[in-house]
């Protein structure tokens, strides 16, 4: 039977980019990548006129 190699997956969900990576048991990054975070309007409630969601 093969020895199991534990890995940890990390994901950073940001407003501009979503980054992700895989780290092995020694803490070495074995894979990493990022993609543009997309904003979807479908399914979100309409904000009243003049609403500032940043506050």
Image (cartoon, rainbow, N blue to C red):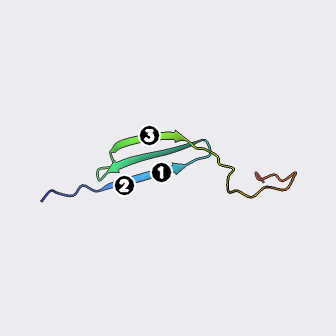
Q: Earlier in the sequence, mark 3 or mark 1?
A: 1
Marks 2 and 3, how far apart at CA: 15 Å
Q: Is residue 4 left or right of residue 20?
A: left
Task: State the SS at label 2.
Answer: strand
Give the quadrant of the N terminus.
Answer: bottom left
Q: Is residue 33 left or right of residue 42?
A: left
Q: Position of residue 50 (x, y in %)?
A: 87, 51
Q: Residues within 10 Å of mark 3 (few under 14, many from 20)?
A: few
User: Which residue is denoted by mark 3 in the rendering?
Assistant: 33
Q: Residue at x 78, y 55 (%)?
A: 46
Marks 1 and 2, how far apart at CA: 10 Å
Q: Residue at x 87, y 52 (%)?
A: 49
In the displayed orientation, state which residue is furthest to the left: 1
Task: State the SS at label 1.
Answer: strand
**Numbered label attached to residue 8:** 2
| Front one among 26 and 13 | 13
Q: Residues within 10 Å of mark 2 (few under 14, many from 20)?
A: few
Q: Residue at x 44, y 52 (%)?
A: 10
Q: Position of residue 48 (x, y in %)?
A: 85, 56
**Numbered label attached to residue 22:** none
Q: Earlier in the sequence, mark 2 or mark 3?
A: 2
| Front one among 5 and 47 | 47
Q: Is residue 12 left or right of residue 50?
A: left
User: Which residue is denoted by mark 1 in the rendering?
Assistant: 11
Q: Residue at x 41, y 46 (%)?
A: 21
């Amino acid at each position: 039977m093969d020895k199991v190699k534990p890995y940890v997956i990390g994901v950073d969900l940001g407003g501009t980019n979503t980054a992700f990576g895989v780290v092995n048991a020694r803490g070495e990054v074995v894979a990493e990548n990022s993609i543009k975070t997309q904003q979807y309007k479908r399914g979100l409630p309409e904000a009243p006129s003049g609403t500032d969601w940043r506050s």
